[in-house]
Structures are given as structure tokens and as C-alpha cells.
Amino acid sequence: MGTEQAQAAAGGGYVVLREAEAGHWVVVGDVDRRPGFTARNSRRQAVRDALGREPAEDEVYAALPRSEWRVARQL
């Protein structure tokens, strides 16, 4: 198994959310983490990857690690 495949299998990725209105978030997508980025830049890239474009200035997004998303859903 390649490094990227192993990372994806281990949950190395993000769930990307968009704030639709104040306090209301919508899941946009689930993307694999790209190697070589710092944590902050990796989250920014995850938003771009989920959208397939640069986010507009008035759009608000969040990128949560898949592992945190899984735990949060179990509460």
C-alpha cells in the first residue's frame, strides 16, 4: 500500500463544512489530506479540494479532521 493510500485508510483527511447561516453548517465533502502542507495550509487546501475552486470571500468554511468527525458523531 502506498503512503497516500495508507494515510487515507488511516483516516488522514478532512470533512469540509460550509456555514449556510449563522450557526447552521452543511457538509460539503470529505477529502484526503495532501502531504507536504502545514496543518493550517492543509485545511485550506482541503476546502479548495472539496469545492473544486477557491472559496469566495463571503463564504465561511471549516475543515475537521475525519477522526474528530467520527468521534463527534458518536456522542
Image (cartoon, grey):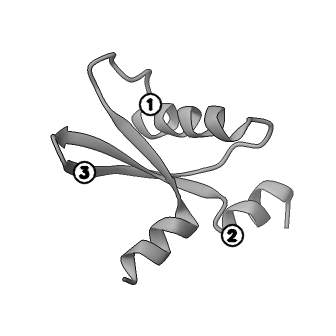
N-terminal of the pair, mark 2 or mark 3, is 2
Residue 20, percent from left and from top: 18, 40
Q: Secondary structure at mark 2?
A: helix
Q: Identify the residue at image location x=37%, y=37%.
A: 61
Label 3, secondary structure: give it: strand
Mark 1 — residue?
52
Q: What's under tag 3, amino acid-wise?
A: Val
- Residue beneath the point at 60% across and 55% down: 13
Q: In the rendered image, which quarter is residue 46 located in?
A: top right
Q: Earlier in the sequence, mark 1 or mark 3?
A: 3
Do callouts 2 and 3 mark residues in contact (Cβ within 8 Å)? no
Q: Is residue 73 above or below residue 22?
A: below
On-image quarter of the C terminus? bottom left
Name which of mark 2 and mark 1 comes first in the sequence: 2
In front: mark 2 or mark 3? 3
**Quarter occupied by the N terminus:** bottom right
Q: Nearer the viewer, residue 6 or 60?
A: 60
Cα distance in 3D space between marks 1 and 3 = 17 Å
Q: CA distance from mark 2 to mark 3?
A: 24 Å
Number of the label disc, if any, that sits on residue 9? 2
Which residue is located at x 68 percent, y 41 percent?
A: 39
Q: As shown in the figure, which amino acid type bears the numbered disc 1? A: Gly
Judge whether 19 appears above or below 73 on screen: above
Mark nearer the viewer, 1 or 3:
3
Is the residue marked by circle 2 packed among few (<14), some (14-19), or many (20+) residues within 10 Å?
A: few
Label 3, on which residue?
26
Direction right: furthest residue: 2
Image coordinates for residue 44, horizontal then vertical, percent: 54, 32
Estimate the x, y position of residue 67 in percent, counting from the top left: 57, 68
Badge 3 density bin: few <14, some 14–19, many ≥20, Cα 10 Å: few
Residue at x 37% of width, y 76% of height: 73
